[in-house]
Image (spheres, rainbow, N blue to C red):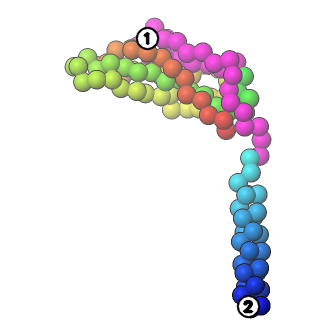
Amino acid sequence: MKKWSVLLAGGVIAASSFGFQGAASAAPTGPTGWPTGCVSQTNFDNGAMARCSDSNGGHYRASVICTRLDGGGKINREATAWRTSGWSNVYCPPMTSFFSAGIVTKAS
């Protein structure tokens, strides 16, 4: 019985030390809030634009939903670059037309 308690205690100590070590390495290094004051709109050139007044340490990018001209449905596209300030732009591909504008945010 004593042998099992020693093994169990040793296993718990080892598991907890590994757990704390992993958690420390995954800890964020800066502010990780969500962007606020965000707006999106059509850019009048078959696409969308978006911006947030304060990133709060997060990021954002424009998103657009486009309608295929051949009747094949809708296509969702997002700007490739995440932004922390300024306008983000994204355009509908050829043979599509603008349907709606949006914004995608993340807290990192």
At mark 1, the secondary structure is: loop
Q: Is residue 51 visible?
A: yes
Residue in view at x 74 percent, y 29 percent: 56
* 55 relative to 25, above or below: above
Callout 1 environment at 10 Å: few (<14), some (14 to 19), or many (20+)?
A: few
List the residue tagged with mark 2.
1
Hey, what amino acid is under mark 1?
A: Asp
Which label number is shown at residue 45? 1
Question: In the image, 103: left or right of 55?
Answer: left
Question: In the image, 86: left or right of 90?
Answer: right
Residue in view at x 70 percent, y 54 percent: 26
Q: Find residue 83 and report its horizontal and vertical position in percent.
A: 62, 28
Q: Is residue 33 magenta?
A: yes
Hey, what amino acid is under mark 2?
A: Met
What segment carries the magenta color?
A: 29-53
* Quadrant of the image occupied by residue 97: top left
Which label number is shown at residue 6? none
The quadrant the N terminus occupies is bottom right
The quadrant the C terminus occupies is top right
